[in-house]
């Protein structure tokens, strides 16, 4: 194997890993705050992708690519991303309020089954609304490429990696520097004590779902820009892999989601390049099993010790 | 009018009747203590006042307003702060972040001034302001929990077992601080298993046994009471 090909695979892995990381953030933040696994998260991605797809088609038709080249390139993508973020944010908050909030005191198994139910509901609703025939998603940033020395990198890959970096920086700032972000950390550590500080726990949980779902919309758009076939089940496999990434990095940890996502993406691309495309997913989950045997809390998972 | 009046309070855990017709009051400027053995219902009473637990019947009047079964996060802004049993500081957050959480309901403009106030009361916390709370000793965590509660400018400060798990020298220190806070104007409701210490700082006390108030009196009276001596003061 030559160095250039290796670098190319690495960049592709980072790009795929960035998408996993953005999705994994949603899983890990919700788990950290509400101590539940939101298995419907992957399907929110799919909804986001559909919303973006239809918005881009509608808005794209309003401009003439000959005379308004810039507007025709920028406006549909921008409108698509923003609208899908808005719709997914609302969807996430509504799902939490209708399906999970009434189960706050219920056993975690009931919540888990509800989440799976919501997942199937979203997939079937999408099938009813948009049929199961695949839509061909055109990348939000076109199909251009940049030349970086000897390497050729597509715009989609570049935008995906940049988006992941920006999101991570923004989230780190939010959770460490803002009052609401600190309150979220307080709730994730001790709900009762957080309430005694005057923090509204229910509102904090909705807020977490809102942020996670907005990120899912971005992930959906990026995912379909890289893998353009969009169907009602598009979100389920990346959802499960991103969940794996979250566990891999240490569920509940934001840096863990980034690390887990990136590693998973890189492992998957290398496995399909050097081992076998059919086996790549098996390799990904194999690595997860080994990591969990050695480090059950995940790579950056914390085992909290209490001092008395 | 009393600052806090609890009347005929009844609390259940499922079918278990944990608090039975408990009544007591706290006047402004007082230290009032609830003492009793493990399981007597002291913590349950505090948690019901702060809204973490729901009462079935009875009333809790705070500053003339019935606050029974109000969500806990709404009570902080009304001037009620609780330092929970076991301190429950946010172990993965820094000392200063913990204090900032205590000021969650306060306008952000006053937070820096209030931090200085708490640091003046607890110089130890100032030294460790950037440290993660999980690295503090038990006594320091208790100070942090108290400082955190003070950040909300409470009218009534409820302390749940502040001496629990601390070395005797630290227990003395914590009770000195309680006395200090009271002198500076805080009204305090103190729940303690360490009856000796609690009664020596309290103006008045109530003795709880299996969910009922069995005796009440001034701190000095209860310290001399034969039954109390026998049960809680080691003879």
Image (cartoon, coloured by chain):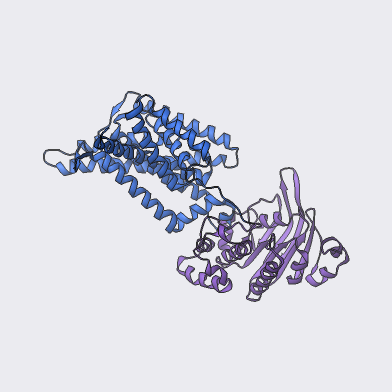
Identify which residue is drawn at 29% across, 31% down: A228
The chain in purple: B
Q: Position of residue A89 (x, y in %)?
A: 40, 43
In the depicted view, which residue is nearer to us: B16 or B147?
A: B147
Q: In this view, does A261 lie above or below B231?
A: above
Q: In screen coordinates, is B42 left or right of A265?
A: right
Q: Position of residue B157 (x, y in %)?
A: 64, 65
Q: In screen coordinates, is B14 left or right of A31?
A: right
Residue A150 seen by the camera: yes
In the depicted view, which residue is nearer to us: B81 or A11?
A: A11
Q: Quadrant of residue A106?
A: top right
Q: In screen coordinates, is A249 left or right of A60?
A: right
Q: In which quarter of the image is residue B234?
A: bottom right
Q: Report the label total.
A: 0
Q: Where is residue A168 in the image (x, y as percent from the top left)?
A: 37, 49
Residue B104 seen by the camera: no
In this view, which residue lies farthest toward the left?
Answer: A67
Q: Is residue B12 above or below residue B202?
A: above
In this view, which residue lies farthest toward the right?
Answer: B226
Q: Where is residue A88 in the image (x, y as percent from the top left)?
A: 39, 40
Q: In this view, does A87 lie above or below B183?
A: above
Shade representing chain A: blue
Quadrant showing the C terminus of chain B: bottom right
Identify which residue is drawn at 39% across, 39% down: A263
Q: In screen coordinates, is A43 left or right of A302?
A: left
Quadrant showing the N terminus of chain B: bottom right
In the depicted view, which residue is nearer to us: A40 or A261?
A: A261
Identify which residue is drawn at 75% across, 50% down: B18
């Amino acid at each position: 194997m030559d160095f250039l090909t290796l670098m190319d695979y690495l960049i592709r892995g980072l790009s795929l890993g960035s998408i996993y990381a953005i999705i994994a953030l949603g899983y890990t933040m919700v788990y950290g705050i509400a101590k539940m696994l939101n298995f419907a998260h992957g399907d929110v991605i799919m909804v986001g992708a559909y919303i973006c797809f239809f918005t881009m088609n509608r808005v794209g038709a309003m401009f003439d690519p000959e005379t308004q080249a810039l507007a025709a390139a920028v406006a549909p993508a921008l409108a698509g991303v923003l609208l899908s973020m808005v719709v997914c944010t609302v969807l996430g908050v509504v799902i939490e309020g209708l399906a999970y909030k009434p189960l706050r005191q219920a056993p975690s198994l009931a919540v888990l089954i509800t989440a799976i139910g919501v997942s199937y509901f979203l997939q079937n609703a999408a099938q009813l609304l948009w049929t199961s025939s695949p839509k061909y998603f055109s990348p939000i940033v076109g199909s251009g490429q940049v030349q970086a020395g000897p390497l050729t990198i597509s715009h989609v890959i570049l935008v995906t990696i940049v988006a992941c970096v920006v999101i991570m920086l923004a989230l780190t700032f939010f959770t460490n520097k803002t009052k609401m972000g600190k309150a979220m950390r307080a709730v994730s550590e001790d709900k009762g004590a957080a309430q005694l500080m005057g923090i509204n726990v229910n509102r904090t949980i909705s807020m977490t779902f809102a942020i996670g779902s907005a990120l899912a919309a971005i992930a959906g758009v990026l995912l379909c820009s890289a893998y353009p076939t969009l169907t009602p089940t598009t979100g389920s496999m990346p959802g499960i892999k991103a969940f794996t990434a979250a566990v891999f990095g240490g569920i509940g940890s934001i840096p863990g989601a980034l690390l887990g996502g990136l590693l998973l993406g890189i492992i998957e691309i290398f496995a399909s390049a050097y081992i076998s495309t059919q086996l790549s997913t098996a390799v990904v989950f194999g690595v997860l099993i080994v990591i969990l045997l050695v480090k059950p809390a995940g790579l950056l998972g914390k085992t909290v010790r209490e001092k008395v | 009018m009393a600052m806090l009046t609890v009347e005929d309070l009844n609390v259940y855990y499922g079918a278990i009747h944990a608090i039975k017709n408990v009544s007591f009051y706290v006047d402004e400027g007082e230290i009032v203590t609830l003492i009793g053995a493990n399981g007597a219902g002291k913590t349950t009473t505090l948690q019901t006042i702060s809204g973490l637990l729901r009462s079935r019947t009875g009333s809790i009047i705070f500053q003339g307003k019935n606050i029974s079964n109000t969500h806990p996060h709404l009570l902080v802004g009304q001037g009620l702060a609780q330092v929970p049993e076991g301190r429950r500081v946010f172990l993965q957050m820094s000392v200063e972040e913990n204090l900032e959480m205590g000021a969650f309901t306060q306008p952000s403009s006053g937070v820096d001034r209030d931090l200085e106030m708490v640091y003046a009361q607890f110089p130890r916390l100032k030294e460790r302001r950037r440290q993660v709370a999980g690295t503090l000793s038990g006594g320091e965590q208790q100070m942090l929990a108290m400082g955190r509660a003070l950040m909300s400018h409470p009218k009534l400060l409820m302390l749940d077992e502040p001496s629990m798990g601390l070395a005797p020298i630290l227990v003395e220190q914590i009770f000195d601080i309680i006395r200090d806070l009271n002198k500076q104007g805080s009204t305090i409701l103190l729940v303690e298993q360490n009856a000796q210490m609690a009664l020596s700082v309290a103006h008045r006390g109530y003795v709880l046994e299996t969910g009922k108030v069995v005796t009440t009196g001034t701190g000095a009276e209860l310290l001399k009471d034969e039954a109390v001596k026998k049960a809680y003061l080691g003879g």
